[in-house]
Image (spheres, rainbow, N blue to C red):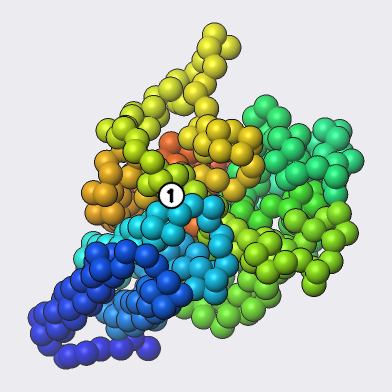
Amino acid sequence: MNLHVSSDPKCSTLLMVSLGVLLYAFFGLAKIALWIWVAGPTSYTWVSLLSANTIEALAWTIWILVRYGRSNGPALAVFPLVCSLYASVPVALLSADLQVFPFSAAVVWNGMVMQSVMATHVWVLTCSAHSKASIANYQSRLNSWIDRLPVTWVGIWIFLLIGLAIACFCLTNFYLSGASALIGNDSRLELTVRVETGKLWLLQYAFECWLIICGIVWASKRARSALTKPQLMTAMTCFLIFIYPYLQIGNRRELMTWFVFCCVLLFMRGRHKTISFLATITIPAFLYLGLVRENSQGASLVATDPLSFYLNLLGEFVFPHFPLLDRLSAPHHLWMGWSYLRLPAFVVPTFGLWHRPASLAIIFAQRYSGGSMGYAYTPLGEGFANFGALSVIIVPLVLVAGGRFLASRHLHSPIPFLIFLAFALEINRGEFISITLEFAVFVVITSTLVRILNFRLVKEKCLAQGQHGA
């Protein structure tokens, strides 16, 4: 059931816009005031910033739920909520007197307030970019597309065999590359390098897209009804084969993206109980994996010091801020868009004649600590390196505008916008080029797999359409 603030659409819109302006003015001015007045942060000021972030996220979430309803509201809130997490988790650790950043207090304060102000702009721009009619239209197109998803007997089996081939190849490579022998002895960076030698990282992307299509098929009642028990068992076998080496390495990144995708899709399909069930199981499992993957040599989790414990648990929300804080700690020349203009160098084939440029994350990791994992140029970090403090406005504007385009009628397929929302975590911990290329790869592979589901022999009918479909 959707909430309504007024029976008059014009009055309702005016009221919601007025509330949005008040929320933006209040939280924006409050954070700027903290930024200006606080010279040396204390536990009290960290708690104040954390409280502002938490209350703001709650207020905007309620605003979105009232404005867009229970189905579309949670889906639209995903991206700004993730941005708020990246702004709030480090602040929560700092308010508990955990020194998670090896930078001066003033530098850390400036960086965290900037991240918080960026989150505020993401909230207000997300609410401004999507009208109630436009998001309702997108939901209608999405549900229509899923309900009419055509699958054939041959298409399903080809799709399952592709997943089985990828899973078996990843398992074989896990042992032949020597990664299995390094479990518990080397860093996760070394493990990942062994497993992803060459272009094998594309296989992980391909299997993640395969999982995304599984989620789409399961969300379609007509497509789901066409599945047989052998096909379901084959799909489960593919998942188990792939997940074994994946968990041995300690990765949770790709599975989290798939989980977010499924949550967004199920919200728009009105499957709220299913989401609650998945979240209850999946989120604790991801947190536990974050702890045990750094204690593979037998160290007790209880004996781990508090700082290491929380960094292992929530490191994805901490380490990506290092490049931004490093830029704030000493004067640097602005790149003026250089990092974004490098995109063609990563797209154009080299034919082995020259080396591709290294990613910003690798350059920083090698310079900062000799190759530690977890460091990445976040959108704000990369934006600040290019445009300075204006990035707290420029970066959210570009990100939200891109998401709005993907949800528009100009794109006939609903998949790109769903993938964009599923990439909420990826976007907040990756540089522009890597995320753009990864997004493009995901769209291409998922679109191809959808077509494979509809592969048919000469006169075979679509199983999902039953007796009444062609």
Quadrant in which residue 93 is drawn: bottom right
List the residue tagged with mark 1. 325
Task: Report the label total.
Answer: 1
For the N terminus, the image quarter is: bottom left
**Residue nearest the viewer, comparing 410 with 119:** 119
Vertical comparison of 347 with 271: above or below: above
Residue ranking furthest to the top: 353
Q: Which residue is drawn at 76% across and 57% down?
A: 293
**Residue nearest the viewer, comparing 249 with 388:** 388
Q: In this view, does 89 lie to the left or right of 243?
A: left
Alpha-carbon neighbours of circle 1 within 10 Å: few (<14), some, or many (≥20)?
many
**Residue nearest the viewer, comparing 354 with 331:** 331
- Residue 32, given in percent of the width and then of the height, sits at 24, 66
Vertical comparison of 355 with 449: above or below: above
Q: Residue at x 53, y 56 (%)?
A: 101
- Residue 189, given in percent of the width and then of the height, sits at 70, 41
**Residue nearest the viewer, comparing 356 with 130:** 356
Answer whether residue 282 is visible to the viewer in this image: no
Residue ranking furthest to the front: 40
Q: Residue at x 67, y 27 (%)?
A: 198
Q: Residue at x 31, y 68 (%)?
A: 38
Look at label 1 and name its amino acid: Leu
Quadrant in which residue 51 is drawn: bottom left
Q: In this view, does 167 lie to the left or right of 456?
A: right
- Residue 257, given in percent of the width and then of the height, sits at 56, 57
Quadrant in which residue 84 is drawn: bottom left
